[in-house]
Image: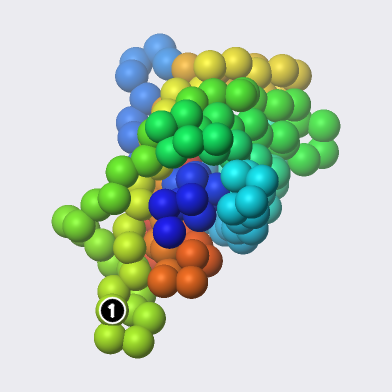
Amino acid sequence: MAGVLATSLGVAVLDAPAGAATPASCTKATFKTDLKKKTSTSQVSGCTKGPATALTLVASFPTLTNIKTTITWKSGGGTNGPFKITEKAVKTGNKCGKTGAKQDTLIVSTGTVASGTGKAASLKGTKFSESLCVKPNQSTYLMAGTKIVI
């Protein structure tokens, strides 16, 4: 299950310090994980305050302690990354749905955007976060009421 977690990295809203870049936030995402290749590709949309309204996020996880993420913004918005992501299973505040009688697992992913090209360069230094729910079959979805913040 942990492999799928790393594939589509998550969201938690963090305020930027004074003078820091304004983070983008996105409300919708679909996730596709390939555990054999140890990659996850997310199509993300509903973005505001970013270089475009949609993006593709690719996470590579040769190990779960070495997760690298690259974001490619649609409409010529540039790229961010690769940058490191840390994931943590969280019990408190888990609003994930249930599969059968068992509650899906909540994984919170965080990181700092280390680089950017084009319009995405304005996001350098912002905090990345997402709250992902993982079903027993390893499929993932964004926890209801949360956003992916970049």
Residue 96: percent from left, percent from top: 34, 68
Residue 118: percent from left, percent from top: 75, 19
Residue at 75% of width from left, 31% of height from top?
77
- On screen, residue 80 versus residue 110, left or right, reads right
Number of on-image labels: 1
Q: Give the image quarter of residue 19.
A: top left
* Foreground pick, 123 / 113: 113
Q: Give the image quarter of residue 135.
A: bottom left
Instruction: Give SS at disc 1.
Output: strand
* Foreground pick, 63 / 31: 63
Q: Furthest residue to the left?
A: 92
- On screen, residue 71 versus residue 14, left or right, reads right
Residue 53: percent from left, percent from top: 68, 45
Q: Give the image quarter of residue 98.
A: bottom left
Q: How is the image coloured?
A: rainbow
Residue at numbered disc 1: 102
Residue at 54% of width from left, 24% of height from top?
83
- Vertical arrangement, residue 98 with respect to residue 70, above or below: below
Q: Furthest residue to the bottom?
A: 100
Q: Amino acid at mark 1?
A: Lys
Q: Furthest residue to the right?
A: 76
Residue at 45% of width from left, 24% of height from top?
112
Residue 39: percent from left, percent from top: 63, 44
Evaluate whether residue 18 shows in this view. yes
